[in-house]
Amino acid sequence: MRIDIVTIFPAIFDALDVSLLGKARRNGIIDLRVKDLRDYTHDRHRTVDDTPYGGGAGMVMRPEPWGEALDDVLGDGDPLVVFPSPAGEVFSQRMARELSAERHIVFGCGRYEGIDQRVLDDTADRARVRLVSLGDYVVNGGEVAAMAMIEAIARLVPGVVGNPLSLVEESHEGGLLEYPSYTKPPVWRGREVPAVLLSGNHAAIARWRRERQLELTRRVRPDLLAGE
Ligand code: 6GU
């Protein structure tokens, strides 16, 4: 999978050099490139923003550098362009799975009060575009949101996570939260590992885990059960 990121803060994405994703990049499974939006400006101050027409607080990102940056990264395949935005559709495990089948995703990370709307309209004429939100709260820019989405998507690309079975039994796969996990020692600070997990009875363990998933989901995220 190829991933391009356009941002005014390329250093934020240094974190994607490490861990599983870093390994997938070195192995060539994920081809991730970070582009500095300011490299597509032509003035001495490398200006990317300006005051909003119609007035109001904050700054809006000017269309010209965005146009040039997207011209540079869109290519002639059929890329999906994601603009992280609190005004977008809400990201989910389902969407991560859907996007993990894409060959090329471009993340356009806006800052300030947003990107000039014409950039979104122009891009939609040339590519598939989605505005995607992490959830119902605001962070300062699309970078942190894009990082979360990239990690959720890339770990579902075959070969990125070493043991694909570890992707099956986790929260939000199957619509439930994950059951609690334990490892050695069997007693720690007087707290015992639930006896059933030491029983060797695999059917009983599966039943216990299912019950914990249902109980936890009912208590913490009843909305996930509403459709059942
Ligand atoms: Cl995608 N961007 C910003 N700025 N804030 C957010 C978000 C995205 N998702 C939730 N909050």
Image: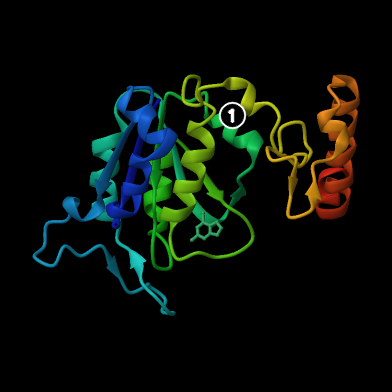
22 or 41: which is nearer to us? 22
- Is residue 195 shown above or below 131? above
The quadrant of the picture occupied by the C terminus is: top right
Determine crowd level at label 1: few under 14, some 14-19, many 20+ residues with C-alpha closer than 10 A.
few
Q: Which amino acid does label 1 sit on?
A: Glu
189 or 152: which is nearer to us? 189
Helix, strand or loop for disc 1: helix
At a point 20% along the width and 65% down the height, the residue shown is 47
At a point 29% along the width and 66% down the height, the residue shown is 49
Where is residue 169 drawn, in percent x and y? 71, 29
Where is residue 197 drawn, in percent x and y? 82, 32
Where is residue 91 drawn, in percent x and y? 60, 45
At a point 13% along the width and 67% down the height, the residue shown is 45
Query: Residue 171 appears in which quarter of the rendering?
Result: top right
Where is residue 204 drawn, in percent x and y? 91, 25
Q: Name the residue under label 1.
A: 98
With 11 as the anchor, is 23 left or right in this view? right
With 35 as the anchor, is 5 left or right in this view? right
At a point 12% along the width and 57% down the height, the residue shown is 42
